[in-house]
Image (spheres, helix red, strand yellow):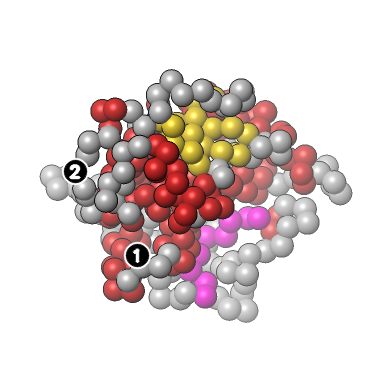
Amino acid sequence: MALHDTTELNSLLERQAPFYSQHFKIIKPHQPLPENCQPLSQRLNKPHYTKALMTFSKSYQQQQEAIDLNALHSMWSQWFFGFLLPPLLEYALRSQTSVLHAAMNLKNWHWTYHQTGRVECFYLVLREDQIQRPTELAITLLERLLVKLITPIIKQLSTLSPVSEKLFYSHVAYCFYWYLSEMSLAQEFKLNLLNQLFSKDTLLLAKDATLPHPLWRKIRLKNSDYPRIMCCLRHKLPNTQMCTICPLNKNKHKVCKTAI
């Protein structure tokens, strides 16, 4: 059942994903925001982003001065997408179309920073004209989300960061893959959705034109133990171990890719 009240929508996320509900709130227009909360357009400009990364870097400067900048920007973006995407997946898989349509408008997004410089909480404004929306398939909603929200954010991040768009999309792909794999969904539906997200070179919503699928070849579906194709670079940060699923583990994989 589609929900239209922000209180009900927030309660839904609290029930289904209590951890993520602490970092993702749906609000009404003109609803008061925390003092340090600002629009996405302001956060993702050079002065704000540079300041956030400088603060974020302090968490890794305990034992050495030089920090691998690619790894630092990559880790910051993993926090960003890690708090942004799971709630949207929850709403998409529960037919809350209004939330996804609100999410596709960059002007509806605000967020606060944690004291470490990473994202602390996203605030999504749900406007009246976005409430009455017909139900759509989950894959349709997710593809539109890729085109209208995630791609513009990644393009902006790539202008602020030394990291390539490929690695940002790799983070998005793994977040989708991991969270969908953890959700309690019918196995056939889950496998079909994963295939539609990661095994198609074009987007299904492209009826009259060919739109390349940004998540194509970003996940290795046939190897659930090592699904990532690109290294996230986290092991290059001080006191940070390599992921257990890192493709750079040459004892497990002979083929790996990096995207710096």
Q: Secondary structure at mark 1?
A: helix
The number of discs equals 2
* In this rendering, position of residue 21 left or right of residue 116: left
Q: Quadrant of residue 249?
A: bottom right
Q: Secondary structure at mark 2?
A: loop
Residue 35's mark? none
- Inspect the magenta stretch and tell me whether residue 96 lies in it: no
For label 2, the residue is 134
Write down the region rendered in magenta: 225-234
Query: Which residue occupies 61% across, 39% down?
Result: 120
Query: Which residue occupies 51% across, 37% down?
Result: 122
Circle 1 crowding by C-alpha within 10 Å: few under 14, some 14–19, many from 20? some
- Whether residue 66 appears in this view of the structure is no
- Inspect the magenta stretch and tell me whether residue 230 lies in it: yes
Extreme residue in the bottom direction: 251
For label 1, the residue is 194
- Single out the mark in the foreground, 2 or 1: 2
Q: Which comes before the other along the chain, label 2 or label 1? A: 2
